[in-house]
Amino acid sequence: MKKPTLLILAAGMASRYGSMKQIDGFGPNGETIIDYSIYDAIKAGFGKVVFIIKEEFVENFKAIFEPKLSGKIETDYVFQNFDLKQFGIEEEIYREKPWGTAHAILSGRNVINEPFCVINADDYYGFDSFKKMVGFLTSEATDSNYSIVGYQIGKTLSDFGSVSRGVCKTNEAGYLEEITERTQVYKKDGGIVYEENGVEYPLEYNTPVSMNFWGFTPAVFKLTEDLFRVFALENKNKPKAEFFIPLIGENLVKNGTASFKVIPTDSQWFGVTYKEDKPFVQECIDQLVKNGTYPENLWN
């Protein structure tokens, strides 16, 4: 059986960060967050990494990653763009930005023929998640059995303000029933709450949430194409509407096409949204180097 593939969402515009955070340096030798994800993925048993990027950045990405990854893991690059004709949509639809993360993964449909997982470029996930995902993709994944890594919400919060989190509701067998987006989640008085219509509701520390770490087989590409065609035409007059990966999960679960195993992890998550996040992320990585999780020179 072929080793699974890691598909990295790196085509975002990073408008709130102010520059290309996907290739910004955070480690002691300028390592990107992507570097740590790929390092963990190789260690866990992934055989290929595919970068979803804007076509104009391909030479930048190759210059940064090819020297490090040559001989360690197969690499490929695919492009997210605005061309709808490739999906059989002849109508011209105006867009202010790309169609979202679920649309982005369709960029990999011609280069991925094995079970794969999708992650964000600007999130740190921890080795445990990659190890458990490889186990799922190599022994449990089928065209109707997918997965999502569920992080404990208490290990995904920011000290700098509220965050949005997709709260996962599971059945007794640990399979996803629904994801509910909570847009204002924050720490308060030693606990965790989310706010809705001015009212605060408590959340348990270990409540599972999605941090966009999904496991699929290539069969999901056809299912996603069908969903995207409907979404694009329904939202042709909404230039900011986005087709997100949780919409795939929600649709496939509701119509019984596929189930999603929620894989629990107690890994600490951290990520970067704003420029102000950079010192915190650098400090987190410094601690991981100091405690021996990673070597100081990651690729040497």
Image (spheres, helix red, strand yellow):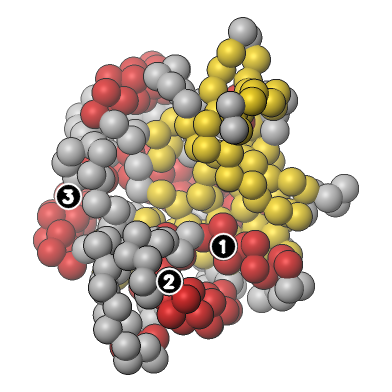
Query: Considering depth in this image, is 241 or 296 the residue closer to the camera?
Result: 241
Mark 2 element type: loop
On the image, numbered disc 1 is attached to which residue? 247
Q: Nearer the viewer, mark 3 or mark 2?
A: 2
In the image: residue 137, left or right of residue 28: right
Q: Nearer the viewer, mark 1 or mark 3?
A: 1
Q: Position of residue 128 (x, y in %)?
A: 58, 39
* Label annotation for residue 4: none
Please tell me whether residue 178 is drawn above or below residue 265 in the rendered image.
Answer: below
In the picture, the quarter occupied by the C terminus is top left
Alpha carbon separation for disc pair 3 and 2: 37 Å
Q: Is residue 56 visible?
A: yes
* N-terminal label among 2 and 1: 2
* Label annotation for residue 64: 3
Alpha carbon separation for disc pair 2 and 1: 14 Å
Q: Residue at x 67, y 38 (%)?
A: 208
Q: Residue at x 37, y 75 (%)?
A: 236
* N-terminal label among 3 and 2: 3
Please tell me whether residue 125 is drawn above or below residue 104 in the rendered image.
Answer: above
Asked if the residues shown at circle 2 and circle 1 are in contact, with their CB atoms under 8 angstroms apart, the answer is no
In the picture, the quarter occupied by the N terminus is bottom right
Q: Nearer the viewer, mark 2 or mark 1?
A: 2
Q: Position of residue 216 (x, y in %)?
A: 58, 66
Mark 1 element type: helix
In the image: residue 107, left or right of residue 300: right
Please tell me whether residue 169 is drawn above or below residue 237 in the rendered image.
Answer: above
Q: Is residue 300 visible?
A: no
Alpha carbon separation for disc pair 1 and 3: 33 Å
On the image, numbered disc 2 is attached to which residue? 235
How packed is label 1: few (under 14 Cα within 10 Å), some, or many (20 or more)? Answer: some
Asked if the residues shown at circle 1 and circle 3 are in contact, with their CB atoms under 8 angstroms apart, the answer is no
Q: Quadrant of residue 139?
A: bottom right
